[in-house]
Image (tube, rainbow, N blue to C red):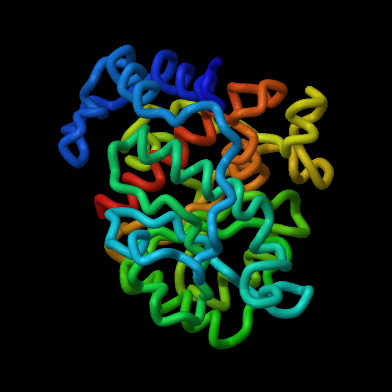
Amino acid sequence: MRRPYARFLAMAALSLPLTTAAPLGGHGLRDASPGVTFARLTDSAPAATAPPILPLPGGRSPSEQKAHSFYFTRAMYSGWGGGWGGGGFGGGSWSVDYPVADRWIVSVLGRLTGVDVFPLENPVRLDDPDLRRFPFLYALEVGGMNLRKEEVEGLRDYLLAGGFLVIDDFWGESEWYTFEREIRRILPEYEIVDIGLDHPIFSTFYEIDEIIQVPNVGQGIAGGPTHENGETGRIPRVRGIFDEQGRLMVIINWNTDLGDAWEWAEDPAYPLQYSTYAYQMAANFIVYAMSR
């Protein structure tokens, strides 16, 4: 029986070029041939089972508390629904695709990159002082963002201290305006610019030569239009915010849904081209964040 995400791993390893930079963490994945990389990935993949129902962060066992090289950290933010959900782990636009997408991404990316990845989800509030411990932060559905003053201050401090924020899954002009209003509260002095494919983030681990629009799971499986929210959601954009030294603080994936592609990669009905691209992008984001 094929492993649940072997279809994705096969495409990722055999069809998409890796860069030829030095290996990460002594695993040698980045300088290996695609065939060797695929063999390593599939040999270490778990047996065909559903993703385990893991305990929420508050119930982690002592063995899970050891330090890891990378934590896939999700931003818990306030939205128009009021607050960030009961107990911090439910409700609110921050929690879309949670925790399944997070669990798939840490499982697959540990194998793709050779990085020691924490094997659970890691949601953190923007006003939590511990946020600075994690150099990578993911936020999605930001068209529903409505931050409290403490969250604005916490995220600003995080980004100016060296943190890296990945924005995903918001569509069209109206959601852009909401996000732009909030990010300008956080970083009012910095410009939002388009990021060209010549930027290192598109070649840090995988060579990416095209921005692909990743649809939500329903549209992806149905094979219809890939965009949402009218004509202004039709063209995918990758934009960013840089500091004075040229460091990329925020990468903005607009008119695309990488999170759904992470979550549904193992579903045979979901187009492989989207999940492959989304995991490629995630690997680049993570390696970029860890190397800066």
Q: Is residue 28 toward the left or the right of residue 263 in the image?
A: left
Q: Does residue 213 sit above or below 151 in this rendering?
A: above
Residue at 43% over, 35% down: 197
Q: Position of residue 105 (x, y in %)?
A: 49, 43
Horizontal relation, residue 219 to residue 149: left or right? right
Residue 66 visible, this orientation: yes
Q: Residue furthest bottom?
A: 149
Which residue lies at the image location 53% right of the left edge and 75% below the top edge? 125
Closest to the observer: 38 or 253?
38
Give the quarter of the image for residue 69.
bottom left
In this rendering, the answer to whether 120 lies above or below 6 is: below
The quarter of the rendered structure image containing the N terminus is top right
Lateral position of residue 245 relative to residue 49, left or right: left
Residue drawn where x is 32% and y is 73% of the image:
161
Q: Nearer the viewer, residue 92 or 234?
A: 92
Q: Is residue 140 left or right of residue 117?
A: right
Image quadrant assignment for residue 83: bottom right
Residue 233: percent from left, percent from top: 74, 43
Along the line of sight, the residue nearer the viewer: 269 or 136? 269
Compared to residue 134, the image places residue 127 above or below, namely below
